[in-house]
Amino acid sequence: MAEHMTPDEFRRAGHAVVDWIADYWATVGQRPVTSQDPPGAVAARLPAGPPEHGEPVEAVLADLDTLITPGLTHWQHPGFFGFFPANTSGPSVLGDLVSAGLGVQGMLWATGPACTELETVLLDWLADLLELPKRFRSGSAGGGVIQDSASSATLVATLVALHRAGGGRWREVGVDRRYRAYASPQGHSSIEKAARIAGLGADGVRPVEVDPQTQAMSPAALRAAIEADLAAGVVPAIVVATVGTTSTTAIDPLPEIGAICAEHGVFLHVDAAYAGAAAVCPELRFGHVGLEYADSYCFDPHKWLLTGFDCDAFWVADTAELIEALSVLPEYLRNAASESGAVIDYRDWQVPLGRRFRALKLWFVLRWYGVEGLRAHIRSGVALAARFAGRVRADNRFALVGAHPYSLVCFRMAADDEVNAELLARVNATGRVHLTHTRVNGRYTLRLAVGSPQTTEVHVDEAWALLVDAATALLPR
């Protein structure tokens, strides 16, 4: 029978695992970006059940090579340009390792004081780094917390908004009238999911028209939607504005949207899941103009700030309102520190009770890279995207679709949707790069998103060369 792993055994096994990860990172660029296996292939390679007797770590690592990695999409690959970046880094992995080793349950201050206090300080650091409004700092009525994802941040914001819109009744009686959430069709799918989880149904989200040129929310359309709902006896609860939409990185106009929300007393949540990281650079803070209107704001360090999933930074301007909406206090959680009112209990700031020590990986990243290192990473992505956009602009068979303020470039061939879909399929089939697509004004559009710390000009130029080769085969000059 295998015994519990001793510290010395863990040390030896840990060295082997770290070596395996380091070798993986060193060679990931040589692998096909996406798996070549058909569905079910990984499951078929696995045994029918767990081993009767314990096995050494070396056996598990060998199976990682033969069973698991061939069936992966390699998100850390320098040629991975799909969706948005979801990149980790050495210091982030080490911070996660320490978090896992400590095994702290940080639901209350009392269950891990340093877990809570480090998180509070780091969220203030980040707020300073992004130059967020002062009202989001812990020394004010506001403060920050780490959620698992922007989806959870949107859900929490929606619940607090319902509490406010119902004059406090929501906490006791639930959804007792028609409430509405507002977002542009370019907003993230998690907005509709949050509304459904909160009991509003898909009908509880009113899509607000966008400007067809910029894909940004129309303030005039938002005002009209709110006023129409008020006239019909529907209570406007929350507006979700997006800085850097998923499709095209469009930027909703916060000054105009915020003024409308303030006029009607509607909760404003700003989702900057991807683009918020860019604000570490002073020259890339243009999306935050008007953020002083926001009741809550979030961005994902796990997208473009070198911190492994899951890590969403979420701030509210009124923590008392948040806690009032979400706090549930059974007897077994009562303790002297909480009763004193002198500490933060982050369990009241999220949907689950329990929470990992996520702040450690963020602390490791901030300590390793420093402010200038993070800025260099962001600027590199923006420069590589601009380089790629320049290639697109110079080839009359292609056209850029919308602006590229960050590190995402949307583009298409001057051809029908079927040709563009085939172009994407051919380029991705090479295994050298991976791009994804969206639809802009109904037209099939390709997306190239830069973010991996391993991506260089060589990889961006290779992506362009593969696109040119495929385009030439599809539509010879």
Image (cartoon, rainbow, N blue to C red):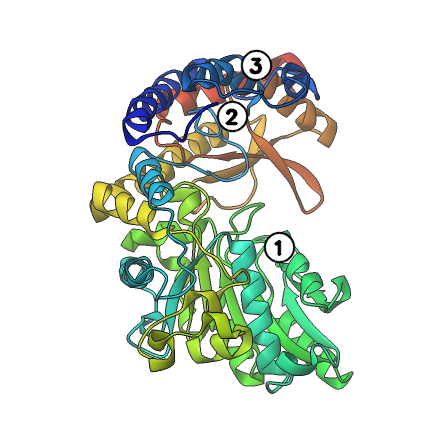
**Mark 3 or mark 1, which has the lower sequence index?**
1
Circle 3 SS class: loop
The residue beneath circle 1 is 190
Residue beneath disc 3: 430
Taking depth in this image into account, of 297 and 143 the one nearest to the observer is 143
Residue at image point 51% right, 55% down: 150
| Amino acid at the residue labelled 1 | Ser
The amino acid type found where label 3 is placed reads Thr
Mark 2 in CB contact with mark 3 (< 8 angstroms): no
**Residue 267 in the image, given as x and y percentages of width and height:** 55, 75
- Residue ID at (37%, 62%): 111
Question: Where residue 47 appears, x then y in whole percent?
Answer: 64, 17
Query: Against 176, is 38 above or below?
Result: above
Identify the residue position indicated by label 2 in the image.
395
| Residue at 31%, 37% in the rendered image | 94
In x, y percent, where is residue 409?
A: 50, 38
Rendered view: 252 above or below 85: below
* Separation of residues labelled 3 and 1 (CA atoms): 32 Å
Q: Is residue 207 visible?
A: no
Query: From the viewer's perspective, is the residue at label 2 or at label 3 nearer?
Result: 3
Q: Which mark is residue 45?
A: none
Which quadrant of the view contains residue 11? top left
Of the pair 102 and 431, the residue shown nearer to us: 102
Quarter of the picture holding the C terminus: top right
